[in-house]
Amino acid sequence: MSKPAKSAEVVPRSPSLMSRVQEDIDRMERMFDSVWPTRFPRLLDWDGMRTTALRAPALDVYEEGDNIVVKAEIPGATRDDIEVNVTDSVLTLSGQKERKEEVKDDKYYRCERSYGAFTRSVELPADVQTSKAEATFTDGVLEIRMPKTEEAKRKAVKLKIK
């Protein structure tokens, strides 16, 4: 006597680790949305990160001697695309940048473009003499040097450690 054929058992596919993580993140965002009226940026939103990178250039702000130095990476922009403003102790960079890459071949054609406005503000660590500030733009990097005011230079006091 032969055994009856077993019916094929359907095993549900388990969700991938990344989809479970994304579900947890979505649940957490809904929880935050119920507490705060403004929406926080998604934690793993790759498109949003790309957009944020376009809008907000990466900055380095540091003190070098009697100067405050700000370096900003703004690839794809020209010096005419960038506007620099200093009000009180806040430096604001804004402008537009555009990138276009076009490849023509006998067998294919590819054209990629990215463009958009950007803005970034940062509070400076000391008061500066805006009339003596200088900016240079080389190879996609904007460097701004601003001398500290005499009062800001005097605020720094070196203490002896006993």
Image: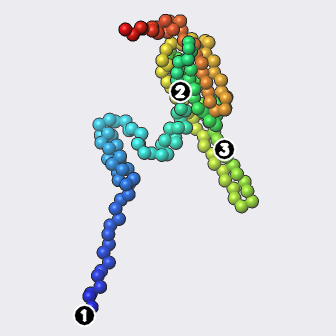
The answer to whether residue 79 is above or below residue 161 is below
Residue 73, percent from left and from top = 58, 32
Quarter holding residue 75? top right
Residue 132's disc is none
Q: Return the residue found at the far front.
A: 162
What residue is drawn where x is 51% and y is 8%?
153
Name the residue tied to disc 2: 60
Circle count? 3
The three-letter amino acid code for the residue at tag 3 is Lys
The answer to whether residue 107 is above or below residue 23 is below
Marks 2 and 1, Cα distance to the nearest angstrom? 81 Å
Quarter holding residue 9? bottom left
Residue 63, percent from left and from top = 53, 18
Residue 121, percent from left and from top = 50, 26
Name the residue tied to disc 1: 1
Asked if residue 7 lies left or right of residue 78, the reply is left
